[in-house]
Image (cartoon, helix red, strand yellow):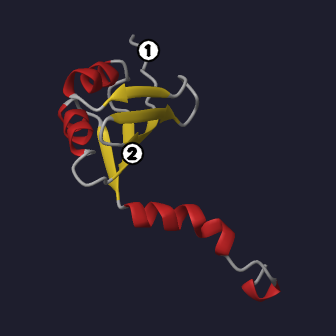
Amino acid sequence: MQTPTQVLNIGADVAKDEIVVACSDGSFPVRKHANNRASLRSLLKSLPTGSRIGMESTGIYHELLANLAHQLGFIVYVLNPKDARNYARGGRTAQQDRSCGR
């Protein structure tokens, strides 16, 4: 009987020359990789198959990572930066008085 591989949730901060990668459960320390094919293939080969990778859309700079990850069978989320920012700010702007029904 095979032991199932742990599926990881990965966040990638993409820039022109570098991609910073972190895991939601801290399975590995934050890693920096050059934004080129060889470096990204090495990164992706080190991750369990089926892991989820989320990144913001950054013009064209996210495309190499997104395409390579998809080709290797990862679940890829490309997020609109405006939506990600609004989601992050969401908790701070919510109404929290008695009129909310709490």
Furthest residue toward bottom: 99
Give the residue type that dot 2 points to.
Gly
Residue 40 image offset from top left, x and y in percent: 28, 26
Q: Is residue 91 left or right of residue 55?
A: right
Q: Residue at x 65, y 66 (%)?
A: 91
Corner quadrant of residue 12: top left
Residue 8 image offset from top left, x and y in percent: 45, 32
Give the residue type that dot 1 points to.
Thr
Residue 34 image offset from top left, x and y in percent: 32, 28
Circle 1 sits on which residue? 3
Task: Identify which residue, 31 or 47, lies in the foreground.
Answer: 31
Provide the secondary structure element on which disc 2 rests: strand
Corner quadrant of residue 102: bottom right
Q: Is residue 43 above or below residue 92?
A: above
Furthest residue toward right: 98
Q: Residue at x 55, y 24 (%)?
A: 29
Task: Identify which residue, 54 or 62, lies in the foreground.
Answer: 62
Q: Residue at x 20, y 27 (%)?
A: 37
Circle 2 sits on which residue? 54
Distance (Cα) linking label 2 and label 1? 26 Å
Residue 43's label in the rendered image is none
Corner quadrant of residue 1: top left
Q: Is residue 75 left or right of residue 72?
A: right
